[in-house]
Image (spheres, grey):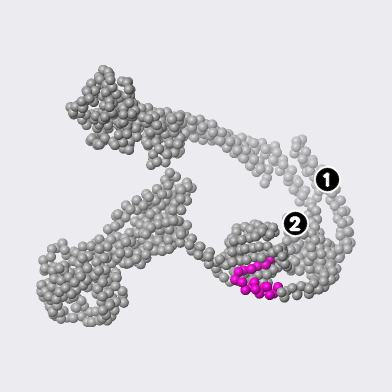
């Protein structure tokens, strides 16, 4: 970064900090003063309200004094004459005095007369029950011991707060003795409050002190109000400040809290003043910044740029003999002179370095060990004659062409590269001396011990190699002899291995270095391992490669586990889960470990792994059932309640709540069965899930009630969400017309923390119920139409069957003299008389041949089934009794009740004849249709037994007339 940029940044940061400090100080001082001014103004406004309220109380006290100091009142308290009441206490007196209550009590404390009046509705009302506790002989309102006594103030009644005044009853010339008390009162209701607000020009609200149902701000203010601090001022928001005042009752106890809302004009003026001041300071600082930069550029920066350019040119030419210009007499000229001196020193050092290199090259070349210099990228930049001999390559083939790793056997590469990196990043942890296998030009393997160190002041490494191949051969011979000694031990170990291998518990044995020695068949199966894959490996391999999703930082966990192992601690009940190779599902294991204290593996560990997969799956299933509704897959009521508590914080505002209720579910359950109702619930749940994002909370909290919680949403988006639900329901109904869905939707939104989620839910539920009231009738009509369609699919009748039946039934009813208003019910009866068939199994209803006795008894139940369904549908209730009795026979041999003759409703007798005729003249799967003549003959044959003979005659006349018209 150039000095110009640094200068600009430093000056800018300085100016910014200065402006911020000025802003902070200004805001603290100026706005603090304006806040104090605002507080004092607020207290004056609150005092105005208190004064206005006091004026009302004083006026009421004066009125009470005028009436109490009067000869007529004095006599009235003694003799209770009715004329005083008629003349002085009509309703007009209350209106004129602007009071709600008056009471006369004699000196013995007995109430002589009391009356209450509603000023708004201009009518007498009962005396408030709550006044009785204030009208006892020892109450301050009745304790007048001298003629100057007076009691006035506020009392709290169940009906509301009241301003009262009590004066002793005296003669007109204010002489005694005190003959009792006169009490006047006026409710501190909305009218009085509005009048006080109009007088003071302020917004006023009132609440009882300690009222648990009061708004939250009143409850908060009550904790700050006391006799010593009767006024509390608190800013409500950027626009309004509110003041609260404590009003004591006649017992000098806290009675009321007055709330005054005042616009924050003083505070806004203070903010404007601070903004203008800061803008002015910004302008001044900007001008000073520009002037400073211009002076720096002219006196310092341009000269530094020239000096820098000269130094760069000398460096590019690699010639320390060059010099820079050193004009002037300030610090920059001194710097230029010092640079020239430095260049002279560099030129001298360069000569000495050349001489030193010649000396070190001679030593490097004539040492007995093979020696090389390795660059940071592991290229060999220099090799001596001994390394030529060991490697089989010449210096020309090695230097600058070969990498150090090309001579290293594969199993040592990783370690070599790791040490090479550590030597440059963590030199204290890099190994200096180690052994490896070197591969020469003839592919011969040589055992080498190497010593590596960093050349000081460079990134290069100096490696000194010693050939120890012969020594290694001698060591191998000793190892073979030792191996023969331990082979006998292996025979006994194999027997123990077989026993442990048959266990169903996973077993792992670690040696004293916590490397894996042996694992049994169960653990191999649990983790998808094999002996060769992990034998001799550190226990970390299981943590790094097999144990999944148990700790975020596996390295920290491994260190903690190994630290427990190092001090011989026991490990118990440690749960983990693994993903065995070739399996899709993870397996849960419970890990136990204890130290081995004796034997071959003393100092090591024995690990046990128990398969707890099934137990964990059951726990997960129980957790799912506790949070989700099993039918719809949505969250349940318990999860919804938890979310309501979680969303109470301000950071989730505005909070939207949508409540949806499935219309007509009970009707569907009663008429079509619970399976159809469950299908409706699942369909409604799918519609709601598809209308919202995956992370939105959609829950089923009742039988047919759903709720959606949407944090941080505005009103417009919430309305769009409701509209999206309605549109999805319309699309569903177009695709599924057989049982259409109808859903009542209500919503609410909370934008302030004072509104709890529970209050929003209640408001949304109320709004949903309002919409539900408008849906009820249309839903019933939809269900009726759905029943009609279902009935059509479960009947042998053709498309024109209902129309023919309705036409014939209406004509026969008119011929029988039935009134016009019954014809609509008859038409409905024709459509739904076999409604109960929806409850008959298809194997019976659609059987192509005759039914046996058991099947006949089953199908006869459709009358009672239809009766129950019709009683559940308000539109079908008028014909429910007809549906029950439409298979009764005129001779009493019908079903289900065995009614006969005139006991069978006339409508059922009419339908029986028309239904039989239409059935006989229509094709059925088990027979062909009869002719008109054959059907009429059959009706006449059954006349007086199955059918009403009079109605059969009239029906035959109707048919003759129809046939005559058609001819």
Give the number of marks.
2
Residue plotted at (79% across, 52% down): 457
Label 1 CA crowd tier, 10 Å (few <14, some 14–19, many 20+)? some
Q: Magenta segment: does it hold 24?
A: no
Judge from the rendering whether residue 842 lies leftward or rightward of residue 895; answer left or right: right
Q: Label 2's element?
A: helix
215 is higher (above) or lower (below) than 916: above
Does any portion of residue 734 appear in the rendered image?
no
Which residue is identified by label 2? 429
Q: Magenta segment: does it hold 499?
A: yes
Q: Quadrant of residue 390?
A: bottom right
N-terminal label among 2 and 1 = 1
Q: Which residue is mark 1?
A: 344
| Residue at horizontal 71 percent and vertical 74 percent from the top | 492
Residue 770 image point, x, y percent:
32, 52
**Is residue 464 in sight in this rendering?**
yes
Residue 790 screen position, x and y as percent: 29, 69
Q: Nearer the viewer, residue 602 or 891?
A: 602
**Residue shown at 21% from the left, 78% from the top:** 922
The residue located at (13%, 73%) in the rendering is: 948
Who is closer to the viewer here, 562 or 540?
Answer: 562
In this view, the residue in front, 41 or 875, is 875
Eye-nearest disc, 2 or 1? 2
Per the rendered image, the range of residues in magenta is: 493-510
Left or right of 764, for residue 876: left
Marks 2 & 1, CB-CB < 8 Å contact: no
The secondary element bearing badge 1 is classed as helix
Gap between marks 2 and 1 measured at Cα:
41 Å
Q: Residue pushed farthest front?
A: 108
């Amino acid at each position: 970064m150039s000095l110009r940029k640094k200068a600009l940044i430093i000056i800018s940061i300085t100016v910014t900090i200065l402006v911020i400090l000025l802003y902070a100080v200004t805001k603290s001082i100026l706005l603090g003063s304006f806040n104090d001014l605002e507080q004092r103004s607020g207290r004056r406004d609150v005092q105005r309200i208190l004064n206005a309220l006091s004026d009302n109380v004083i006026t009421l006290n004066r009125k009470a004094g005028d009436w109490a100091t009067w000869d007529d009142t004095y006599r009235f308290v003694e003799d209770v004459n009715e004329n005083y009441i008629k003349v002085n206490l009509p309703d007009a007196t209350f209106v004129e005095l602007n009071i709600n209550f008056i009471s006369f009590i004699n000196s013995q404390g007995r109430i002589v007369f009391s009356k209450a009046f509603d000023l708004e509705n201009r009518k007498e009302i009962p005396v408030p029950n709550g006044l009785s506790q204030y009208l006892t002989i020892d109450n301050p309102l009745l304790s007048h011991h001298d003629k100057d006594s007076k009691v006035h103030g506020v009392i709290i009644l169940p009906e509301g707060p009241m301003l009262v005044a009590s004066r002793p009853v005296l003669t007109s010339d204010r002489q005694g003795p005190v003959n009792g008390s006169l009490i006047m009162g006026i409710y501190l209701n909305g009218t009085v409050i509005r009048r006080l607000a109009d007088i003071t020009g302020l917004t006023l609200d009132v609440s009882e002190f300690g009222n648990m149902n009061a708004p939250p701000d009143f409850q908060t203010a009550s904790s700050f109000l006391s006799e010593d601090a009767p006024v509390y001022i608190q800013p409500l928001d950027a626009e309004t400040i509110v003041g609260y005042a404590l009003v004591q009752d006649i017992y000098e106890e806290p009675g009321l809290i007055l709330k005054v809302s005042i616009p924050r004009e003083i505070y806004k003026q203070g903010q404007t003043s601070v903004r203008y001041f800061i803008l002015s300071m910004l302008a001044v600082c900007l001008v000073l910044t520009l002037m400073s930069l211009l002076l720096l550029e002219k006196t310092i920066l341009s000269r530094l740029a020239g000096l820098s350019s000269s130094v760069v040119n000398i460096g590019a030419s690699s010639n320390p003999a060059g010099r820079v210009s050193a004009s002037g007499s300030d610090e920059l000229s001194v710097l230029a002179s010092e640079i020239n001196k430095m260049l002279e020193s560099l030129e001298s050092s360069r000569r000495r370095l050349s001489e030193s290199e010649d000396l070190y090259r001679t030593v490097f070349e004539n040492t007995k060990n093979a020696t090389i210099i390795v660059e940071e990228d592991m290229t060999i930049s220099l090799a001596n004659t001994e390394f030529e001999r060991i490697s089989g390559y010449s210096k020309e083939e090695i230097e600058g062409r070969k990498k150090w790793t090309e001579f290293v056997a594969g199993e040592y590469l990783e370690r070599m590269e790791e040490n090479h990196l550590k030597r440059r990043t963590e030199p204290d942890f890099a190994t200096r001396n180690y052994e490896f296998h070197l591969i020469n030009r003839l592919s011969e393997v040589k055992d080498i011990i190497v010593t590596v160190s960093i050349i000081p002041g460079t990134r290069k490494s100096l490696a000194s190699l010693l050939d120890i191949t012969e020594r290694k051969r001698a060591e191998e011979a000793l190892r073979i002899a030792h191996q023969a000694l331990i082979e006998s031990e292996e025979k006994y170990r194999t027997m123990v291995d077989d026993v442990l291998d048959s266990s169903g518990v996973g077993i792992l044995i670690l040696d004293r270095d916590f490397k894996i020695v042996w694992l049994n068949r169960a653990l191999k199966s649990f983790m998808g391992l094999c002996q060769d894959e992990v034998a001799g490996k550190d226990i970390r391999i299981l943590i790094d490669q097999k144990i999944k999703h148990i700790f975020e930082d596996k390295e920290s966990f491994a260190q903690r586990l190994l630290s427990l192992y190092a001090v011989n601690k026991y490990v118990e009940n440690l749960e983990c889960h693994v993903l065995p190779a070739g399996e899709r599902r993870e397996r849960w294991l419970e890990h136990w470990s204890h130290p081995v204290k004796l034997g071959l593996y003393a100092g090591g560990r024995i690990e046990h792994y128990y398969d707890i997969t099934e137990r964990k799956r059951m726990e997960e299933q129980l957790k799912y059932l506790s949070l989700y509704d099993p039918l719809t897959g949505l969250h349940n009521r318990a999860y919804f309640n938890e979310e309501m508590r979680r969303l109470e914080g301000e950071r989730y505002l505005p909070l939207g709540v949508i409540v949806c209720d499935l219309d007509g579910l009970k009707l569907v359950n009663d008429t079509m069965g619970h399976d159809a109702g469950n299908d409706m619930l699942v369909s409604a749940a799918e519609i709601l899930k598809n209308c919202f994002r995956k992370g939105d909370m959609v829950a089923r909290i009742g039988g047919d009630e759903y709720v959606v919680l949407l944090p941080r949403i505005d009103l417009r988006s919430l309305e769009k969400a409701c509209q999206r639900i309605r549109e999805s329901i319309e699309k569903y109904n177009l695709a599924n017309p057989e049982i259409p869905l109808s859903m009542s939707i209500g919503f609410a939104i909370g934008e302030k923390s004072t509104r709890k989620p529970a209050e929003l839910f209640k408001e949304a539920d109320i709004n949903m119920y309002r919409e539900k009231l408008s849906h009820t009738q249309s839903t019933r009509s939809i269900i009726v139409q759905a029943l009609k369609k279902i009935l059509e699919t479960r009947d042998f009748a053709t498309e024109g069957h209902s129309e023919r039946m309705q036409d014939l039934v209406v004509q026969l009813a008119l011929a029988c003299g039935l009134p016009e208003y019954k014809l609509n019910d008859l038409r409905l009866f024709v459509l739904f008389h076999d409604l109960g068939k929806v409850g008959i199994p298809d194997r019976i209803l659609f059987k192509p041949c005759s039914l046996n006795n058991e099947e006949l008894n089953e199908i006869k139940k459709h009358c009672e089934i239809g009766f129950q369904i019709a009683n559940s549908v308000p539109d079908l209730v008028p014909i429910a009794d007809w549906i029950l009795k439409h298979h009764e026979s005129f001779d009493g041999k019908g079903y289900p009740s065995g009614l006969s003759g005139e006991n069978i409703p006339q409508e059922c007798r009419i339908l029986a004849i028309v239904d039989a005729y239409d059935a006989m003249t229509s094709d059925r799967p088990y027979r062909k249709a009869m002719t008109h003549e054959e059907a009429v003959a059959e009706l006449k044959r059954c006349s007086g037994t199955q059918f009403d003979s009079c109605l059969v005659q009239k029906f035959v006349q109707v048919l003759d007339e129809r046939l005559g018209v058609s001819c």
